[in-house]
Image (cartoon, rainbow, N blue to C red):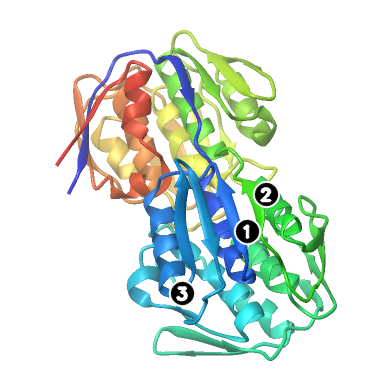
Amino acid sequence: MDKLIIEGGRALEGRVRISGAKNAALPILAASILTSETLCVENVPRLRDVSTMCGLLTQMGLWVRQAAPGALELSGHALSNPLAPYDLVKTMRASILVLGPLVARCGHARVSLPGGCAIGLRPVDLHIKGLQAMGAEIDIAHGYLHARAQRLKGTRIVLDLVTVTGTENLMMAAALAEGTTVIENAAREPEVIDLARCLNAMGAQVRGAGSDIITIEGVDKLHGARHAVMPDRIETATFLAAATMTGGRITLEGTSAGLLDAVLDKLREAGASIAANDAEITLEAQGRPRAVSIRTAPYPGFPTDMQAQFMALDAIADGTARVTETIFENRFMHAQELKRMGADVEVEGNTAVVRGIERLDGATVMATDLRASACLVLAGLVARGETVVDRIYHLDRGYEQLEAKLSALGARIRRAA
């Protein structure tokens, strides 16, 4: 099993290009189920989760071809097997995104209950309730969701909780439903907006994406289209946090500050100077960062996917911070690993109190999920001596060539078996 070996103590300097967003690419790839024509998707990151989704679509009968680096062509003209089996779904919770499109296009689907990172329950009941409200009959047996509908019907759906994948699943299903669907308490994330752009390019009629009320006028069929995936705001924020921690100066190309208001505010509070335009972000930091307290919340609040990285920042910051997690109930597993490196972290329910120390010590640590992996890599960049991060297969699910990009910025980091 691969691991990363990091020699800490170097400030990050230079330029690096940000990849397409995993959390936008996955639902957009799933949207290819909705048409028999070809969907061309550009700026697709090379990630394990993307490979898993392509494998899932291929076994359903979709034709998937790499047209160029970072570009995929997908055609659903031969879709014949509306099944998402356990052996593919178990590694990636986002596989649930095929449920809505399959029911809408094929009238039936059999989808394994999902797996993925062990950061909390993330139940799929909101997906199920929404599809049932649209007329689908859904049973759960032997670990599989069995869904059937002659044609979904537009309706009003009020989500009990804000759910990104739930909003996306129902939005895709509603694109081919009969009549108008209104999703209230919808997720407002930029990835939802990106999916809506792709669907509309395919001939869907989606309005209101980015607000908490999304309206979809169902159409009889969708056609092919070309769409470029938005930049990865979490990868962007992870590199910015790393530069802040190391006291570096970096420029990130192919990304946008408009996706990251809550994170950029906190980085400035930590002492970083940030300049940005429509195409790139430059951050400069000197000396030890100041401690910043964060509280995760649905977009446009502080993203849960950056909570772990900011805990690493606070671990070496000047002062004491409180890190409060409101989205997932089991997302502090990285705290114990940080403590192995000398961090002063105490977890109290859904809040961690982090008292910053001047320097962490390198140690062998184990990644427990995707963003915890990034947290430990960032900690290794500022630690004294060598840090070994085990079980980095999580990183390969969500960061494209992380060690290569960090090396290009001057970090001493390498992969080993």
Local SS, label 3: loop
Percent coordinates x, y for residue 174 in the rendering:
74, 72
Amino acid marked by disc 2: Asp
Q: CA distance from mark 3 to mark 2?
A: 25 Å
Image point (66%, 28%), residue name: 257
Can residue 144 be seen at all in this image of the molecule? yes
Question: Measured along the vertical axis of the image, is residue 242 above or below residue 33?
Answer: above
Q: Residue at x 44, y 61 (%)?
A: 54
Q: Is 46 placed left or right of 158 in the picture?
A: left
* Circle 1: residue type: Val
Residue indicated by mark 3: 61
Q: Nearer the viewer, mark 3 or mark 1?
A: 3
Q: Among all residues in the image, which is located at the extreme left?
A: 417
**Is disc 1 placed on a helix, strand or loop?**
helix
Q: Which residue is mark 2?
A: 194
Task: Say which amino acid is labelled 3.
Answer: Gly
Which residue is depicted at the point 74% across and 70% down? 175
Q: Which mark's residue is nearer the viewer, 2 or 1?
A: 2
Q: Which mark is residue 164?
A: 1
Label 1 crowd bin: few (<14), some (14–19), many (20+), radius 10 Å: some
x and y percent of residue 340 in the render?
A: 24, 36
Image quarter (top left, top right, bottom left or bottom right) of the C terminus? top left
